[in-house]
Image (cartoon, grey):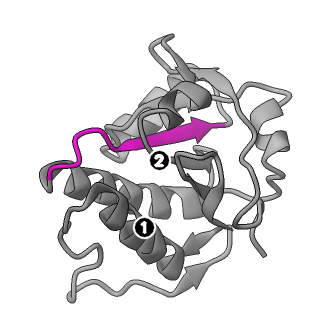
Amino acid sequence: MPVLATGKNAPLFELASTAGRKFSLKDALARGPVLAAFFKVSCPVCQYTLPFVERLYQQFRRAGAENIRVWGISQDDVPSTEKFAKEFGLTFPMLIDEEPYLTSSDYGLDHVPTLVLISPDGGVEVSGDGFSKSDLLEVRKSLAGQFKVKPAELFMPSEQVPAFKPG
């Protein structure tokens, strides 16, 4: 069951990155779609999922979509989040949703990881929690159409990737 249903308006938010820079969803959407990846550093399914989100991010950048916006939204503190990003090779911005997790609450999160692809008009295009191969492929397809690029395949034939892992 999606957290925020497809077609609903995504709640606007402004969060600081691990470096202290402010990120505004409203400002970002004026320049294109945003993929928000909510996570906790201690979550094994987050540890499995976010490297695939990084792969997606890098593939789009290499395909010419330099303005792609992927944001990791951590429910942990800055040092833990920075360590997590380094350990899993994550290069997209890491934003901090501090207790009492207002942004996560606005998005109706019960589980992490949760991915939400938000279109420039503020509508939710893809939403789901846990690791979902089909959700990631749907995100890839939508972004390829919006950026008019053809990224590499997200999942390699040699990889044993499950269809779903609950968060």
Tell me the tag on residue 35. Answer: none
Quadrant location of the C terminus?
Answer: bottom right
Tell me the tag on residue 33. Answer: 2
Q: Mark 1 points at which residue?
A: 142
Q: How many dots with numbers? A: 2
- Is 8 left or right of 128, judged from the image as shown? right
Q: Taking the image as drawn, is residue 101 in sight?
A: no
Give how far apart the Cα atoms at labels 2 and 1 are. 10 Å
Q: What stretch is highlighted in magenta?
A: 64-74
Q: Residue at 38%, 73% (x, y): give it.
A: 141
Disc on the earlier residue, 2 or 1? 2
Element assignment for label 1: helix
Above or below, 5 against 13 in this view is below
Above or below, 111 against 131 in this view is above
User: Observer-nearest residue: 74 or 146?
Assistant: 146
- Is 108 left or right of 67, judged from the image as shown? right
